[in-house]
Amino acid sequence: MFFSLVARRARRTFISLKRSAVKGAALTLCLAVISFIGCSLFANRDALLLSDLLMLITLIFIPAWALFFILDIKNYGVKVFHRYDEDIIGGAFTGINRSSARFEDGLLTFHSGDFRGALDIFTDMDTGSYKMTREEQGVLSFFRGRCYQIMGLYPNALLCYNKAEGNGFQLDELPLFVSRCCSETGDTAGAVAELEKILDTDHKYSSRARYEIGMIYVRLDDAETALKWFDEAIERREAYADALGGAAVAHTMLRRIDKGEECFRLALLNNIENEEEFMSYFKKIQAAVILKRNDGYLRR
Protein backbone atom coordinates (compact mmCIF):
# COMPACT_ATOMS: atom_id res chain seq x y z
CA MET A 1 0.00 0.00 0.00
CA PHE A 2 2.76 2.46 0.92
CA PHE A 3 4.64 1.95 -2.32
CA SER A 4 1.39 2.16 -4.28
CA LEU A 5 0.66 5.55 -2.73
CA VAL A 6 4.18 6.74 -3.42
CA ALA A 7 3.91 5.61 -7.04
CA ARG A 8 0.59 7.41 -7.51
CA ARG A 9 1.90 10.58 -5.90
CA ALA A 10 4.97 10.41 -8.14
CA ARG A 11 2.69 10.07 -11.14
CA ARG A 12 0.64 13.04 -9.95
CA THR A 13 3.87 15.06 -9.60
CA PHE A 14 5.01 14.03 -13.07
CA ILE A 15 1.69 15.11 -14.61
CA SER A 16 1.90 18.46 -12.83
CA LEU A 17 5.46 18.91 -14.10
CA LYS A 18 4.35 18.08 -17.64
CA ARG A 19 1.41 20.49 -17.57
CA SER A 20 3.49 23.21 -15.95
CA ALA A 21 6.17 22.80 -18.62
CA VAL A 22 3.61 23.43 -21.34
CA LYS A 23 2.31 26.55 -19.59
CA GLY A 24 5.85 27.75 -18.85
CA ALA A 25 6.87 27.24 -22.48
CA ALA A 26 3.86 29.20 -23.69
CA LEU A 27 4.64 32.09 -21.34
CA THR A 28 8.32 31.98 -22.29
CA LEU A 29 7.49 32.11 -26.00
CA CYS A 30 5.23 35.13 -25.53
CA LEU A 31 7.82 37.03 -23.48
CA ALA A 32 10.63 36.09 -25.88
CA VAL A 33 8.63 37.42 -28.84
CA ILE A 34 7.87 40.63 -26.95
CA SER A 35 11.57 41.02 -26.06
CA PHE A 36 12.60 40.37 -29.67
CA ILE A 37 10.17 42.98 -30.99
CA GLY A 38 11.14 45.46 -28.28
CA CYS A 39 14.81 45.01 -29.05
CA SER A 40 14.18 45.58 -32.75
CA LEU A 41 12.09 48.70 -32.19
CA PHE A 42 13.79 50.45 -29.30
CA ALA A 43 17.39 49.18 -29.10
CA ASN A 44 20.23 50.07 -31.41
CA ARG A 45 20.45 46.56 -32.81
CA ASP A 46 18.43 44.58 -35.32
CA ALA A 47 17.82 41.57 -33.10
CA LEU A 48 18.96 39.70 -30.05
CA LEU A 49 22.02 37.53 -30.44
CA LEU A 50 21.27 33.81 -30.33
CA SER A 51 23.20 33.45 -27.08
CA ASP A 52 21.24 36.32 -25.55
CA LEU A 53 17.96 34.81 -26.73
CA LEU A 54 18.82 31.40 -25.24
CA MET A 55 19.81 33.02 -21.96
CA LEU A 56 16.56 34.98 -21.90
CA ILE A 57 14.50 31.87 -22.59
CA THR A 58 16.29 29.98 -19.80
CA LEU A 59 15.84 32.82 -17.31
CA ILE A 60 12.13 33.03 -18.07
CA PHE A 61 11.26 29.33 -18.55
CA ILE A 62 12.76 27.82 -15.38
CA PRO A 63 11.07 30.23 -12.90
CA ALA A 64 7.81 30.08 -14.88
CA TRP A 65 7.86 26.26 -14.89
CA ALA A 66 8.54 26.20 -11.15
CA LEU A 67 5.76 28.72 -10.46
CA PHE A 68 3.14 26.87 -12.52
CA PHE A 69 4.17 23.56 -10.93
CA ILE A 70 3.79 24.93 -7.39
CA LEU A 71 0.38 26.40 -8.22
CA ASP A 72 -0.80 23.15 -9.82
CA ILE A 73 0.43 20.71 -7.18
CA LYS A 74 -0.83 22.94 -4.35
CA ASN A 75 -4.40 22.40 -5.53
CA TYR A 76 -4.17 18.74 -4.57
CA GLY A 77 -2.86 19.24 -1.04
CA VAL A 78 -2.69 15.90 0.77
CA LYS A 79 -4.76 14.17 -1.92
CA VAL A 80 -2.83 11.37 -3.59
CA PHE A 81 -4.22 11.95 -7.05
CA HIS A 82 -7.62 13.55 -7.63
CA ARG A 83 -8.41 16.99 -6.30
CA TYR A 84 -12.04 16.03 -5.59
CA ASP A 85 -13.94 12.80 -4.84
CA GLU A 86 -10.84 10.65 -4.55
CA ASP A 87 -12.72 8.16 -2.41
CA ILE A 88 -15.33 7.77 -5.18
CA ILE A 89 -12.94 7.66 -8.15
CA GLY A 90 -10.36 5.38 -6.56
CA GLY A 91 -7.74 4.14 -9.00
CA ALA A 92 -9.60 5.28 -12.12
CA PHE A 93 -8.23 8.00 -14.38
CA THR A 94 -4.79 8.07 -12.79
CA GLY A 95 -2.86 7.50 -15.99
CA ILE A 96 -0.73 9.91 -17.98
CA ASN A 97 -3.06 9.90 -20.96
CA ARG A 98 -5.72 11.87 -22.78
CA SER A 99 -8.71 10.29 -21.02
CA SER A 100 -7.34 11.05 -17.53
CA ALA A 101 -6.61 14.66 -18.43
CA ARG A 102 -10.06 15.10 -19.98
CA PHE A 103 -11.81 13.50 -17.02
CA GLU A 104 -9.99 15.82 -14.65
CA ASP A 105 -11.21 18.79 -16.68
CA GLY A 106 -14.76 17.46 -16.32
CA LEU A 107 -14.34 16.88 -12.59
CA LEU A 108 -13.11 20.44 -12.01
CA THR A 109 -16.01 21.78 -14.11
CA PHE A 110 -18.47 19.66 -12.11
CA HIS A 111 -17.22 20.98 -8.79
CA SER A 112 -17.31 24.55 -10.04
CA GLY A 113 -21.10 24.14 -10.32
CA ASP A 114 -21.23 24.13 -14.13
CA PHE A 115 -23.10 20.85 -14.47
CA ARG A 116 -24.05 21.40 -18.11
CA GLY A 117 -20.41 22.02 -19.00
CA ALA A 118 -19.30 18.97 -17.03
CA LEU A 119 -21.96 16.83 -18.70
CA ASP A 120 -20.74 17.94 -22.13
CA ILE A 121 -17.20 16.83 -21.25
CA PHE A 122 -18.29 13.50 -19.75
CA THR A 123 -20.62 12.79 -22.67
CA ASP A 124 -17.86 13.56 -25.16
CA MET A 125 -15.68 11.04 -23.34
CA ASP A 126 -18.43 8.41 -23.58
CA THR A 127 -18.55 8.43 -27.38
CA GLY A 128 -15.92 5.72 -27.70
CA SER A 129 -13.09 7.98 -28.84
CA TYR A 130 -11.34 7.70 -25.46
CA LYS A 131 -9.70 4.51 -24.31
CA MET A 132 -10.89 3.57 -20.81
CA THR A 133 -10.81 0.61 -18.47
CA ARG A 134 -14.04 -0.97 -17.16
CA GLU A 135 -13.49 0.77 -13.82
CA GLU A 136 -13.08 4.12 -15.55
CA GLN A 137 -16.21 3.56 -17.62
CA GLY A 138 -18.14 2.91 -14.40
CA VAL A 139 -16.84 6.10 -12.76
CA LEU A 140 -17.56 8.15 -15.88
CA SER A 141 -21.13 6.84 -16.13
CA PHE A 142 -21.72 7.66 -12.46
CA PHE A 143 -20.65 11.28 -12.87
CA ARG A 144 -22.76 11.61 -16.01
CA GLY A 145 -25.67 10.31 -13.93
CA ARG A 146 -25.03 12.87 -11.20
CA CYS A 147 -25.05 15.68 -13.76
CA TYR A 148 -28.34 14.48 -15.21
CA GLN A 149 -29.91 14.04 -11.77
CA ILE A 150 -28.88 17.50 -10.56
CA MET A 151 -30.25 18.99 -13.79
CA GLY A 152 -33.57 17.16 -13.30
CA LEU A 153 -33.17 14.76 -16.24
CA TYR A 154 -34.03 11.68 -14.21
CA PRO A 155 -34.56 9.04 -16.97
CA ASN A 156 -31.10 9.86 -18.37
CA ALA A 157 -29.63 9.68 -14.87
CA LEU A 158 -31.11 6.21 -14.34
CA LEU A 159 -29.61 4.95 -17.60
CA CYS A 160 -26.17 6.21 -16.53
CA TYR A 161 -26.44 4.78 -13.01
CA ASN A 162 -27.43 1.38 -14.43
CA LYS A 163 -24.48 1.53 -16.81
CA ALA A 164 -22.17 2.43 -13.91
CA GLU A 165 -23.39 -0.55 -11.87
CA GLY A 166 -23.03 -2.78 -14.93
CA ASN A 167 -19.37 -1.83 -15.05
CA GLY A 168 -18.84 -2.77 -11.40
CA PHE A 169 -19.14 0.73 -9.91
CA GLN A 170 -20.23 0.74 -6.27
CA LEU A 171 -21.06 3.59 -3.92
CA ASP A 172 -23.04 3.60 -0.68
CA GLU A 173 -25.15 6.56 -1.84
CA LEU A 174 -26.06 4.99 -5.19
CA PRO A 175 -29.26 3.19 -4.01
CA LEU A 176 -30.53 6.53 -2.66
CA PHE A 177 -29.78 8.29 -5.94
CA VAL A 178 -31.42 5.54 -8.00
CA SER A 179 -34.49 5.48 -5.73
CA ARG A 180 -34.96 9.25 -5.94
CA CYS A 181 -34.68 9.16 -9.73
CA CYS A 182 -37.24 6.33 -9.93
CA SER A 183 -39.57 8.32 -7.69
CA GLU A 184 -39.23 11.43 -9.86
CA THR A 185 -40.08 9.44 -12.99
CA GLY A 186 -43.24 8.03 -11.37
CA ASP A 187 -41.82 4.56 -10.79
CA THR A 188 -42.87 4.29 -7.16
CA ALA A 189 -42.52 0.51 -7.06
CA GLY A 190 -38.96 0.76 -8.40
CA ALA A 191 -38.07 3.51 -5.94
CA VAL A 192 -39.34 1.52 -2.95
CA ALA A 193 -37.78 -1.73 -4.19
CA GLU A 194 -34.36 -0.09 -4.47
CA LEU A 195 -34.54 0.98 -0.82
CA GLU A 196 -35.98 -2.32 0.39
CA LYS A 197 -32.79 -3.99 -0.88
CA ILE A 198 -30.82 -2.29 1.89
CA LEU A 199 -33.40 -2.57 4.68
CA ASP A 200 -32.07 -4.31 7.80
CA THR A 201 -28.65 -4.92 6.24
CA ASP A 202 -25.20 -3.67 7.17
CA HIS A 203 -25.40 -1.09 4.38
CA LYS A 204 -24.22 2.38 5.40
CA TYR A 205 -27.65 3.92 4.72
CA SER A 206 -29.82 1.05 5.91
CA SER A 207 -31.02 3.17 8.82
CA ARG A 208 -32.30 5.86 6.41
CA ALA A 209 -34.23 3.50 4.14
CA ARG A 210 -37.55 3.64 6.01
CA TYR A 211 -37.42 7.42 6.21
CA GLU A 212 -36.64 7.67 2.48
CA ILE A 213 -39.55 5.34 1.64
CA GLY A 214 -41.83 7.46 3.80
CA MET A 215 -40.82 10.59 1.90
CA ILE A 216 -41.64 8.87 -1.40
CA TYR A 217 -45.24 8.46 -0.20
CA VAL A 218 -45.34 12.02 1.14
CA ARG A 219 -44.55 13.27 -2.36
CA LEU A 220 -47.38 11.04 -3.63
CA ASP A 221 -49.76 12.67 -1.12
CA ASP A 222 -50.26 9.27 0.55
CA ALA A 223 -49.79 10.38 4.14
CA GLU A 224 -51.22 7.21 5.71
CA THR A 225 -48.64 4.94 4.04
CA ALA A 226 -45.88 7.49 4.66
CA LEU A 227 -46.72 7.63 8.37
CA LYS A 228 -46.49 3.86 8.64
CA TRP A 229 -42.86 3.98 7.46
CA PHE A 230 -42.01 6.99 9.62
CA ASP A 231 -43.49 5.34 12.73
CA GLU A 232 -41.42 2.20 12.09
CA ALA A 233 -38.28 4.32 11.75
CA ILE A 234 -39.08 6.21 14.97
CA GLU A 235 -39.72 2.97 16.86
CA ARG A 236 -36.37 1.59 15.65
CA ARG A 237 -34.64 4.95 16.26
CA GLU A 238 -33.50 4.98 12.62
CA ALA A 239 -32.71 8.46 11.22
CA TYR A 240 -34.66 9.48 14.30
CA ALA A 241 -34.83 13.26 13.88
CA ASP A 242 -35.60 13.04 10.16
CA ALA A 243 -38.28 10.41 10.80
CA LEU A 244 -39.88 12.70 13.40
CA GLY A 245 -39.85 15.48 10.84
CA GLY A 246 -41.49 13.19 8.28
CA ALA A 247 -44.12 12.16 10.83
CA ALA A 248 -44.79 15.84 11.56
CA VAL A 249 -45.52 16.43 7.87
CA ALA A 250 -47.63 13.26 7.51
CA HIS A 251 -49.77 14.01 10.60
CA THR A 252 -50.32 17.55 9.36
CA MET A 253 -51.35 16.29 5.91
CA LEU A 254 -53.89 14.09 7.73
CA ARG A 255 -55.17 17.26 9.49
CA ARG A 256 -53.82 16.17 12.87
CA ILE A 257 -52.42 19.63 13.48
CA ASP A 258 -51.61 19.19 17.20
CA LYS A 259 -49.84 15.84 16.64
CA GLY A 260 -47.96 17.39 13.74
CA GLU A 261 -46.78 20.26 15.96
CA GLU A 262 -45.66 17.80 18.62
CA CYS A 263 -43.52 15.82 16.16
CA PHE A 264 -42.25 19.07 14.67
CA ARG A 265 -40.93 20.22 18.06
CA LEU A 266 -39.38 16.81 18.77
CA ALA A 267 -37.62 16.87 15.39
CA LEU A 268 -36.10 20.26 16.20
CA LEU A 269 -35.10 19.14 19.69
CA ASN A 270 -33.31 16.15 18.18
CA ASN A 271 -31.33 18.37 15.80
CA ILE A 272 -32.91 17.50 12.48
CA GLU A 273 -30.60 18.14 9.54
CA ASN A 274 -31.22 21.20 7.36
CA GLU A 275 -33.32 22.73 10.13
CA GLU A 276 -34.27 25.93 8.29
CA GLU A 277 -35.26 24.04 5.15
CA PHE A 278 -37.36 21.62 7.20
CA MET A 279 -39.09 24.43 9.10
CA SER A 280 -39.95 26.24 5.88
CA TYR A 281 -41.31 23.06 4.27
CA PHE A 282 -43.36 22.08 7.33
CA LYS A 283 -44.90 25.54 7.69
CA LYS A 284 -45.89 25.57 4.03
CA ILE A 285 -47.61 22.19 4.40
CA GLN A 286 -49.28 23.30 7.61
CA ALA A 287 -50.49 26.59 6.12
CA ALA A 288 -51.91 24.78 3.07
CA VAL A 289 -53.79 22.26 5.25
CA ILE A 290 -55.20 24.93 7.57
CA LEU A 291 -56.24 27.07 4.60
CA LYS A 292 -57.99 24.10 2.99
CA ARG A 293 -59.71 23.24 6.28
CA ASN A 294 -60.92 26.81 6.81
CA ASP A 295 -62.11 27.00 3.23
CA GLY A 296 -64.17 23.87 3.86
CA TYR A 297 -65.76 25.46 6.91
CA LEU A 298 -66.69 28.59 4.94
CA ARG A 299 -68.43 26.54 2.25
CA ARG A 300 -70.69 24.79 4.72
Image (tube, rainbow, N blue to C red):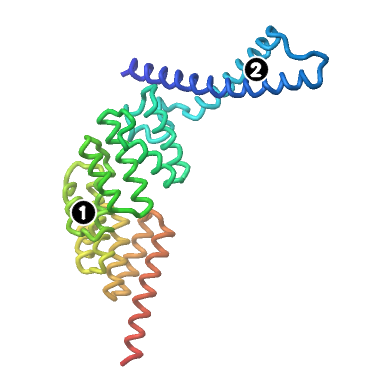
Amino acid tagged 1: Arg
From this viewpoint, which residue is outermost toward the right?
A: 44
Residue at coordinates 36% horizontally, 64% vertically from top-left? Answer: 265
Amino acid tagged 2: Ile
- Which of the 4 quarters of the picture holds residue 6? top left
Residue at coordinates 38% horizontally, 35% vertically from top-left? Answer: 85
- Give the residue number, with chain letter if any, for mark 2: 60
Query: Residue 208: x, y in percent?
Result: 26, 51
Along the viewing direction, whichever of 77 and 163 lies nearer the viewer: 163
Along the viewing direction, whichever of 136 and 285 lies nearer the viewer: 136
Query: Residue 69: x, y in percent?
Result: 54, 22
Marks 1 and 2, the one that precedes in the sequence: 2
- Give the residue number, with chain letter if any, for mark 1: 236
Q: How crowded is the residue under tag 2: few (<14 C-alpha within 10 Å), some, or many (20+)?
A: some
Q: How far apart are the two marked residues, 1 and 2, measured between alpha carbons?
A: 67 Å
Query: Residue 34: x, y in percent?
Result: 70, 23
Of tags 1 and 2, which is closer to the observer?
Answer: 2
- The reply, left or right, for residue 66 in relation to residue 98 is right
- Eyeballing the image, is 140 above or below 257? above
- The reply, left or right, for residue 86 in relation to residue 29 is left
**Are the residues at dot 1 and dot 2 in contact (C-beta closer than 8 Å)?**
no
Circle 1 SS class: helix
